[in-house]
Image: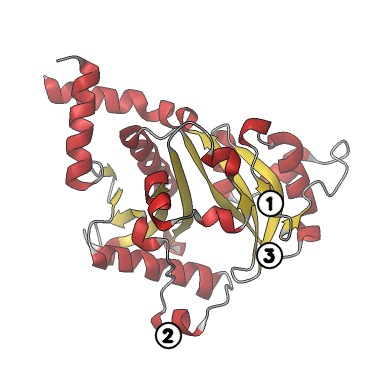
Amino acid sequence: MSIEKTIQSLSTLNLERNGFPELRGGNLGVRIATTDEERDAAQALRYRVFYEEMGAIPDSRTARLKRDVDEFDEYADHLLVIDHAISSGAKGVVGTYRLMQGDAARRLGKFYTSSEYDISPLTEFPGRLLEVGRSCVDLNYRGRAAMQLLWRGIASYIFLHRIDVLFGCASLPGTNPDALSDELTYLYHNHLAPPALRVRALSERRVEMLRADPQVLDHRRSLARLPPLIKGYLRLGGYVGDGAVIDEQFNTTDVAVLVKSELLADKYYRHYERRLRDALD
């Protein structure tokens, strides 16, 4: 059997078992949620971070449940960072990222991002899509280790599911775009997606990103002020869409981000190729 077919067979086996083998870094591990309790723990973490810490405005149901839950959760996979020193199950969840493939979005009838952007350049793209969102890490774990594990988890998910384009909404804090003028201008001037992949903010929600003269902008300072997650996308060669969107409920200003997946998966491909080759020996 060729190595390509063997990799495909092992990938399918792992997917059927639990998404992909858990990746470890010390006490921390990253894997896909497999139980209702683990998914509930992810929603509870999202509530603590988004509502209690970052000032999102809950509706009555959200406040009563103390969970960040929406209609997309049922169709998505939930990537978890788990601290095994606490628990190897739901009680150990300290980070999460929601992943929704194109097939799941078609069953639901929409992507989350389509509430803010015209994503037809992506849905018409001849490839497999993965929408990412609802990323958060517990305050006590916001260091390099947890974020690296999340990125490794996303890369392995992309590798196993053969994703072509990753995209989603990423947030800057606050709802005053003038206070974010330099950051938005920097993103638009330096990282605007090429026309074939350029999603655009819905006209009724669009906020102009080019808000300052890019020729006099302090680009290094503007980059430094971006949230770590957005900087992570940019380091991977990611792009932003045209136009920002104010999200009053979550107290954020959103930008659309997208990454051609080979830019992300290539960093980890050789690691997985070695692991799968070792399984054959």
Q: Are marks 1 and 3 in contact (CB under 8 Å)?
A: no
Which element is circle 2 on? helix
Question: Tag 1, which secondary structure?
Answer: strand
**For residue 224, above or below residue 57:** above
Residue at image mark 2:
64
Name the residue carrying label 3.
Answer: 174
- In the rendered structure, find residue 158 and report the number of the disc placed on it: none
Q: Which residue is mark 1?
A: 201
Q: Amino acid at mark 2?
A: Arg
Mark 1 or mark 2: which comes first in sequence?
2
Instruction: Give the image quarter of residue 245.
Output: bottom right
Query: Which dot, 1 or 3, sits closer to the camera?
Result: 1
Say which of marks 3 and 2 sits in front.
2
Q: Give the quadrant of residue 242.
A: top right
Between residues 38 and 207, which one lies in front from this camera angle?
A: 207
Separation of residues labelled 3 and 2 (CA atoms):
25 Å
N-terminal of the pair, mark 3 or mark 2, is: 2
Front in this rendered view, residue 119 or 174: 119
Specify whether residue 72 is in view. Answer: yes
Up/down of 191 relative to 111, above or below = above
Residue located at (76% from left, 64% from top): 176
Q: Residue at x 83, y 41 (%)?
A: 217
Residue under the image location 59 percent in, 43 percent down: 120
1 and 2 marks in contact (CB < 8 Å):
no
User: Where is residue 63 drawn, in percent x and y?
Assistant: 47, 82
Q: Nearer the viewer, residue 207 or 218?
A: 207
Q: Determine whether 68 is above or below 98 in the image.
A: below
- Nearest the eye: 270 or 138: 270
Relative side of 104 to 228, left or right: left
Q: CA distance from mark 1 to mark 2?
A: 32 Å
